[in-house]
Image (cartoon, rainbow, N blue to C red):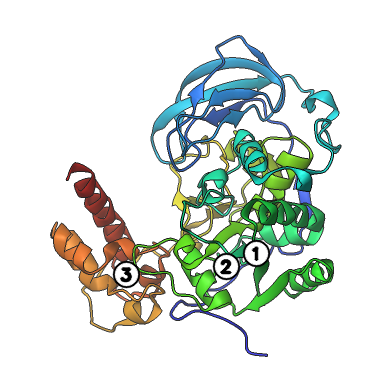
Amino acid sequence: MKIKRFSGGLHPPEHKSTAARAIEQCSLPDELVIPLAQHIGAPAEPCVVIGDTVAKGQLIAQPRGFVSVPIHASSSGVVTAVEPRLHPMGRPLLAIVIKPDGRDAWPDGLEGGMNPLLVNPLTLPPSRLRDMVCNAGVVGLGGATFPTHVKLSPPGGKKIDTLILNGVECEPYLTADHRLMLEETGRVLAGIDILRRILGVERVCIGIEENKPDAIAVMRDACVRRDIEVIALKVMYPQGAEKQLILAVTGRQTPSGGLPMDVGVVVQNVGTAAAVADAIIHGRPLVERIATITGPALVEPKNLRIRIGTSLRHLVAECGGLREEVVKVIMGGPMMGQTQLSLDVPAIRGTSGLLLLGKNAVATRSEGPCIRCARCVSVCPARLLPTTISAYARRDMIAEAERFNALDCIECGCCAYSCPARIPLVQSIRQVKGAILAKRRLS
């Protein structure tokens, strides 16, 4: 059988040494720093003050607007501060600080049980289920953190006929979704049932790269009687990007400047599906997630279930500490992750992994001149001309960069990774994209 894929892309070394490591529960830290900006859209607004006692899962910040979600306490304790703290974005942003009391118990017997207010979630109307997803603060856990209830609210005239579950996890080093599919298959499938009910779609597919044969086998076995297709995909980065995944699974090309809804598709990460199940079936908001803590500088890489707000330093200690000096800390994978300034920043909802690299794992060669090899063009999954856009970006020629479809860049990093001259192509394109959007807001 022909393995499906998209055009362009590349296959960097996988480094998935934690693929066989079962998920472990991370210990409770001494302090939880929970930022109010953890999702695409408006940051939440605090509804607690210093000195308040909070229960695990209690609402601590209200959403502001449709493209926003509430935030909940990730453990029980006392609010000790509401103040700016260093954020993974690289600057201090408002956060709620909680000193855990050590009990860490879900209230009202929600631990592992059914939501006492619910009999059968699939009998509820889609609008009610969508509201429950929103109230639980569920966002995309693949890293984008787009509010899930917004994705589940297609505008009038947009007919959705296909739901794709993203189990690709194409970033090197990361294995959290892989372990989730193997160990907590039921959570994922329960979430898929709810997502299908909300969207009213017939066709449901799960895309998984063929380097995870055990996950493909487990999911296929579990989906036999659910009318869900499990599709093996070629190992090729960035197979997990939405537009590339849609193309590989359905053959549909999302138009330039368009969204998956424009071709009748909604894509959700498998971790998001599990969070939806927790929200609806157990009444539990999104206060924890699975993340891969890894890298050659770490003593014992692991897949951990972490509470939102746990410091990166605590996660490193949970894995036995460091075996060498760290020269680069990345939240997420090495291709699209964010470099961090400190281990004192907190893990947030979008923290799919933490990568710690020593000096031997980081290239330090200086940038050279473009040699016109066109490798960046051949690997670009969006079929762009990265060096041309980058050249315009460096000269502040915003209109010209826009004319070459700079906004279609998905910032996967394939161009910069393959460039023999080490030109920071994706960084300059990212900068000009911001300039284009700022210009549009003013016009």
Residue 200, how many percent across, how many down?
A: 65, 57
Residue 175, how many percent across, how many down?
A: 66, 60
Q: Which residue is pictured at 21% across the width and 62% down the height?
A: 402
58 and 367: which is toward the camera: 58
Q: Which residue is pictured at 21% across the width and 73% down the height?
A: 369
Mark 2 or mark 3, which is nearer to you? Answer: 2
Mark 1 or mark 2, which is nearer to you? Answer: 1
Q: Amino acid at mark 2?
A: Cys
Sequence-first tag of 1 and 3: 1
In this picture, is 419 found above or below 303? below
Q: Give the labeled residue for mark 1.
A: 167
Mark 1 or mark 3, which is nearer to you? Answer: 1
Q: Which mark is residue 170?
A: 2
Sequence-first tag of 2 and 3: 2
128 and 134: which is toward the camera: 128
Q: Which residue is pictured at 63% across the width and 89% down the height?
A: 2
Q: Amino acid at mark 1?
A: Gly
Describe residue 418's horizontal placement relative to residue 146 as left or right.
left
322 and 187: which is toward the camera: 187
